[in-house]
Image: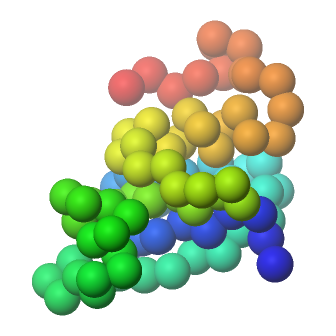
Amino acid sequence: MPALKLFSHHLCPYVQQARIVLGEKSINHDLAFIDLANKPDWFLAISPLGKVPVLLVMTGYGHFSPGVTPTCRHASGPPEPPDKMPVN
């Protein structure tokens, strides 16, 4: 089982960014899609505002929205040089 699980919605640009970074870094992860029009109770328990992305890490949950991508970027090694980091 991968150490990371990313909860997503197919239209969320922040999830798409996080998936790109996870893929570029070859970080093994699971992906789960959430129907934001019909959020399950267990999802609201880990994301009280009902927003994605949510990154489940072995030790717990992290809901960072735009912050998920930098978290993924640094998950597999040292930070990238500033000239390699995307401009927001």
Which quadrant is home to the N terminus? bottom right
Q: Residue at x 18, y 88 (%)?
A: 38
Q: Position of residue 24 (x, y in %)?
A: 74, 50
Q: Relative to 58, is 39 above or below? A: below
Q: Residue at x 41, y 50 (%)?
A: 63
Horizontally, residue 29 falls left or right of residue 18, namely right
Residue 25 in view in this figure:
yes
Q: Position of residue 73 (x, y in %)?
A: 66, 38
Classify residue 78 by image quadrant.
top right
Q: Position of residue 76 (x, y in %)?
A: 82, 41
Residue 11 in view in this figure:
no
Instruction: Looking at the picture, tell me which residue is in the foreground, 66 or 11.
Output: 66
Q: Relative to 33, is 77 above or below? A: above
Q: Relative to 77, is 17 above or below? A: below
> Outermost residue, top direction?
82
Which quadrant is home to the C terminus? top left
> Outermost residue, left direction?
37
Horizontally, residue 37 falls left or right of residue 50, namely left
